[in-house]
Image (cartoon, helix red, strand yellow):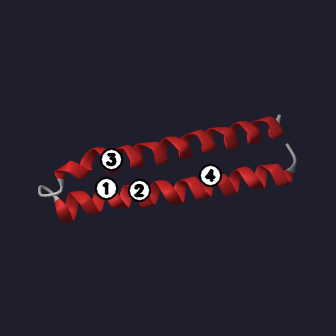
Amino acid sequence: MTPDEIRALEKAVGKAKRIASERAGELHDLVEDRLPAAYQEIPAIAQAAYDACHAWAEANARLKAAQAANDA
């Protein structure tokens, strides 16, 4: 991969991590501030946090694979 492609992957990982952190914050706020009254919100917020973390993990794996291929 070219250095520009690696930088694009790094940017995608950073963006995915930011989104995952935001979703984790929403889950934390639910637990800290709104439970037990807002218990119905748990599945949707938890799924959004899971999906965001999964997207980050996939982007990070692509970046690591690209970096390893460039180092070889």
Q: Label 4 vs label 1: CA separation?
A: 21 Å
Q: Label 3 vs label 4: CA separation?
A: 23 Å
Residue at left offset 69%, top offset 53%: 10
Q: Label 3 vs label 2: CA separation?
A: 11 Å
Quadrant housing residue 38: bottom left
Residue at left offset 25%, top offset 52%: 41
Residue farthest to the bottom? Answer: 33
Labels 3 and 2: the sequence-earlier one: 2
Q: Which amino acid type is shown beneath numbered disc 2?
A: Arg
Residue identified by numbered label 2:
23
Residue identified by numbered label 3:
44
Q: Residues within 10 Å of mark 3 (few under 14, many from 20)?
A: few
Q: How crowded is mark 1: few (under 14 residues within 10 Å), some or many (20 or more)?
A: many
Q: Label 4 vs label 2: CA separation?
A: 15 Å
**Considering depth in this image, is 44 or 66 the residue closer to the camera?**
44
Q: Do the residues labelled 2 and 1 touch (CB within 8 Å)?
A: yes
Q: Residue 13 carries which label?
A: 4
Say left or right for 36 vs 23: left
Q: Residue 27 carries which label?
A: 1
